[in-house]
């Protein structure tokens, strides 16, 4: 008799593993989600003006992983959008990560040129330098530059985003936005980047569109009645174990949406405000798919502490204490038979979408190999 799989969570991780099992093992898969929609935090929808809104903040698909790109491309075609982020530094619009072009936006030309020469003589072209490492400079000009970038791009943004001093934020997080010794002003350098023409919700709907897959929304794991042979859990791993060792910490965000009676509000899809205001950035969604409307929709993003029952989990907070706590849950998870954890919340990892898909593909390989023995 065919096996039944239960997948908890309908985001990229859950949808990817569900599809692989349904298609390649020809087994039944039930996918449940507590939310009333599929696609998890990648959920998007067209509003009444025809603008595609990313409900949980901007999502840009980018990857160097050929297998992930091949898999996802089966369910969506993507535009050739290459993301840039504008930051407002001392009232000047420039691109970040801080790069060679940024130098010329924020400094007088002679000074920018001097800095540029110093950077090129000290670092390899195309190198990405984490900001905390960039601070370790002996040269006076570079020291000045490092302090400038730290203060203007990094310190206040990171404090707003994480609620703590940058020294308390894990290096892997802060290295996501390095100093880039390059004229490449894009936010990502991946080979494949883009936004699905029909949106993320449609992409995930296509992934789940298989005769062996059944979707049940507004269904919590604890309310699920029914038997299953394998469980794939993309929800919070600490919740699964009833918080027996304590709660894993998360950062949350909330968005203040505004519909404005103007074609465009800002010059780019995302504008960061590292030093000003309480929000970290403003998203303007119509840029992603070049939606045409006389109106525009923006979302101001505010970072806040995650509190159970009050808001959503967005970012795991990687540090020594949370790693030790996660390890306890992970050790216990390994004892369970036919139970697999994946996704940002299941693995407690700051995955981008492509890494979440990749992890699902890896978990599938594990199962496939076990089945063939
Ligand atoms: N960051 C910063 N200034 C910026 C943008 C990002 O200091 O203008 C730092 C900040 O610590 C942030 C991290 O880089 O949490 C990662 O930013 P990213 O844009 O990758 O975050 P995401 O888009 O995943 O929310």
Image (cartoon, rainbow, N blue to C red):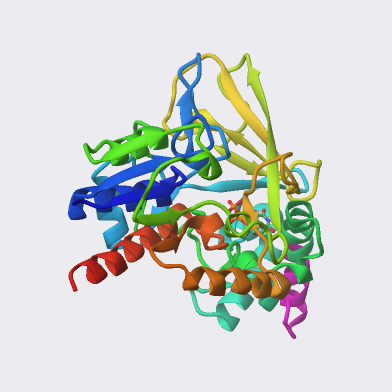
> Residue 21: image x %, image y %?
26, 53
> Residue 77: image x %, image y %?
28, 39
> Residue 127: image x %, image y %?
51, 74
Residue 324: tell me if it is visible: yes
Q: Is residue 137 magenta?
A: yes
Please tell me which residue is depicted at 26% across the width and 70% down the height of the picture.
Answer: 370
On-image quarter of the C terminus: bottom left
Out of 352 and 300, give the one closest to the viewer.
352
Q: Magenta region, mostly helix, strand or loop?
A: helix
- The stretch of residues the image draws in magenta is 135-149
Out of 108 and 10, give the one closest to the viewer.
10
Please tell me which residue is depicted at 43% across the width and 60% down the height of the picture.
Answer: 355
Please tell me which residue is depicted at 57% across the width and 38% down the height of the picture.
Answer: 56
The extreme bottom residue here reads: 138
Name above or below for residue 153 compared with residue 181.
above
Name above or below for residue 91 compared with residue 155.
above
| Left or right of 207, for residue 113 | right
| Left or right of 335, for residue 97 | right
> Residue 342: image x %, image y %?
46, 59
- Which quadrant holds residue 205? top left
Name above or below for residue 10 compared with residue 170.
above
Q: Is residue 57 magenta?
A: no
Total tally of numbered discs in the picture? 0
């Amino acid at each position: 008799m065919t096996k039944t799989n239960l997948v908890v969570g309908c985001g990229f991780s859950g949808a990817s593993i569900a599809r692989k099992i349904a298609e390649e093992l020809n087994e039944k898969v039930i996918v449940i989600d507590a939310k009333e929609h599929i696609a998890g935090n990648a959920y998007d929808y067209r509003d009444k003006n025809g603008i595609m809104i990313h409900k949980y903040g901007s999502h840009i698909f980018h990857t160097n992983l050929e297998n992930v790109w091949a898999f996802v491309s089966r369910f969506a075609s993507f535009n050739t959008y290459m993301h840039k982020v504008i930051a407002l530094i001392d009232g000047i619009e420039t691109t970040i990560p801080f790069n060679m072009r940024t130098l010329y936006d924020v400094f007088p030309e002679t000074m920018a040129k001097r800095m540029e020469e110093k950077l090129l003589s000290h670092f390899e072209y195309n190198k990405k330098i984490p900001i905390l490492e960039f601070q370790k400079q002996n040269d006076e000009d570079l020291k000045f530059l490092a302090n400038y970038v730290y203060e203007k791009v990094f310190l206040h943004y990171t404090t707003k985003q994480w609620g703590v001093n940058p020294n308390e934020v894990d290096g892997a997080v802060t290295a996501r936005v390095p100093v880039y010794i390059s004229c490449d002003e894009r936010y990502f350098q991946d080979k494949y980047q883009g936004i699905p023409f029909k949106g993320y919700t449609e992409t995930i709907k296509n992934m789940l569109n298989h005769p062996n897959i059944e979707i049940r929304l507004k269904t919590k794991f604890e309310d699920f009645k029914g038997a299953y042979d394998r469980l794939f859990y993309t929800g919070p791993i600490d919740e699964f174990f009833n918080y027996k060792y304590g709660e894993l910490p998360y950062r949350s965000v909330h968005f203040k949406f505004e519909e404005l009676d103007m074609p465009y509000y800002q010059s780019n899809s995302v504008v960061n405000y590292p030093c000003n205001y309480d929000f970290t950035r403003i998203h303007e969604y119509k840029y992603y798919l070049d939606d045409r409307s006389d109106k525009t929709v923006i979302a101001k993003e505010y970072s806040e502490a995650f509190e159970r029952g009050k808001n959503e989990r967005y970012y795991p907070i990687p540090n020594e204490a949370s790693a030790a706590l996660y390890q306890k849950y992970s050790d216990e998870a390994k004892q369970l038979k036919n139970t697999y954890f994946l996704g940002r919340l299941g693995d407690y990892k700051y995955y981008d979408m492509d890494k979440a898909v990749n992890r699902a593909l890896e978990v599938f390989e594990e199962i496939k190999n076990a089945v063939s023995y």
